[in-house]
Image (cartoon, rainbow, N blue to C red):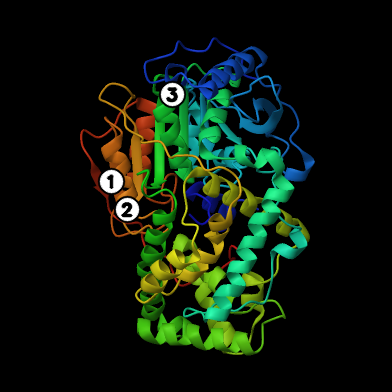
Amino acid sequence: MRAAALYSAAGSLLLTTLAAAPAQSVPPAGPGSAEAHGTAEAHGTAVAARRAAAAGIEFGRCPKAEDLPGGMRCGTVSVPLDYAHPDGKRIELTVSRVRATHQDPDGGKREVPGRGALLYNPGGPGASGLYFPLVGMVPEWKRIAAAYDLVGYAPRGVAPSAPLSCQDPGDFFKGPRPAPTRPSESYKKERAAEAEAYARDCAKRGGDALRHYHSLNNARDLEVVRAALGERRLTFMGASYGTYLGALYAELFPSHVRRMVFDAVVNPDPEQVWYRNNLDQSEAFEDRWDDFKEWVAGHDAVYGLGDTARKVQDAYEEASARLAARPAGGTVGPAQLQGAFLKAGYYDDYWPHRAEALSAYLKGDPQPLIDQAGTRTAEGAAGAENSNAVYTAVECNDAPWPTDFEVWDRDNTRLARRAPFETWDNVWTNLPCAYWRAPRQQPLDVRTAPGELPPTLVLAAERDAATPYEGALELRRRLAGSVLVTERDAGTHGIAGGPNDCVNGHLEAYLLEDRLPARDTSCAPRPEPEPRRSAAPRA
């Protein structure tokens, strides 16, 4: 799935709102635990977890480069690079934490009892969760922050946790670029050559270590972090790719799970990971793009981009053609325009700001569009390059991919006829996997039997494009005892801790009271965004 635009509802709230645990013994191995699988990696995970439980985490100041507030504390956890050889090379994962406040969120004097650590992964793969503990400052998270130590971490490969890089960050953002929805044969050959070169550079820079950056090792890392935190059982919340990571953990370590929340669910079917998931994502984004255009058309009096979705599409295509002829600010071409508007497919919060930028550009003011789609700072480029490197390594390592470009060309040419908005951009993002040089893993067939796993909560927006709704239904079928809460007729990617009180009520009941609905249920959609001109998320 796409990494560059991913952040959870928690991260969205932070962007719009914000300018050491004692070691305990590891729980005994259950029949579905990693130890019971009998592999060298399972043995290595158990060894690493025992070491981490004994060492704990020494929390102190956070790395200056991460620009985290002084109230947050950070530490590191040592994990094997290769779990089959736990005494070999190790890497350090950076972990962040804010302790539970224990304060009554309603202003009373009662002390809220602690419920341990809530560990979070925001997705990607390639996204960092180090900022997650800041959600405790957001009103929607106050109750959870009162009871839980909020814990985030940078997964392996994500700076500062043994960061991966596949190219010089200065070369990562190539702009301006075209974004043809019907690419020519010569353009396809050019992009295929770039993808092959990128895969080659990943292999050169990553060396022998590159093969060890994959989702199974991410799940094993999660088990070691759990042990280091002194948690006998894991309370985990994953968004987007984080749901796939959580599903793998549930399969490998079901007896070590206390609670799990899966928010915006990746389809875990082994046949879907990852090539077919990306095809489904491209198709779903077309529907979400239509949602955005309908909203803009409904506010034609504000933006003047047309009173029908077709007219809004025409306005977008006019802007793309102008940018192809003369890039805005020298950096924003059609591809940068498409990348900026792709984020509107992820999050409703972007709708007013993208519409305003498009309107201003067509009326002669390119600055809002440059601000939202232009070249990143050197620091931002380094972070984006690192994130993309991890995304590529994990997805390419995780599963088999078609190695013949003709397969990609056939499938996506057909798909682009009905879903042109994201299809080819998604191809160029993932095409290095066709030329990948590291060994591929075989995806696990995630399934838990009744009673094997504690009840879990699955959250999904019905029109989520980044992780189409079928993924939530599939995970619900595979995890016995799970319950699905759906936000109807909504498409924001990641709904926990957002503006929907119904969704948050189910989340709090589960995390704070161990209570789930008796059966799958749904919530009415959040209100659509207002077409106001206010401070915008710029990224």
Number of marks in the rendered image = 3
Q: Is residue 459 above or below residue 291?
A: above
Residue 124 in sight in this render: no
Q: Amino acid at mark 1?
A: Leu
**Chain-order first, disc 2 or disc 3:** 3
What SS does tag 1 mark?
A: helix
Label annotation for residue 469: 2
Which residue is under mark 3? Answer: 253
User: Which residue lies at the image location 47% right of the left edge and 32% below the top edge?
Assistant: 236
- CA gap, disc 1 to disc 2? 7 Å
Q: CA distance from mark 1 to mark 3?
A: 22 Å
Q: Are marks 1 and 2 in contact (CB under 8 Å)?
A: yes
Which residue is labeled 1 in the image?
473
In this view, the residue farthest toward the left is: 519
Q: Callout 2: helix, strand or loop?
A: loop
Q: Does the residue at mark 2 contact the one at mark 3 (Cβ under 8 Å)?
A: no
Q: Residue at x 46, y 20 (%)?
A: 233
Say whether residue 157 is left or right of residue 452.
right
Q: Nearer the viewer, mark 2 or mark 3?
A: 3
**418 or 362, which is in the foreground?**
418
The three-letter amino acid code for the residue at tag 2 is: Tyr
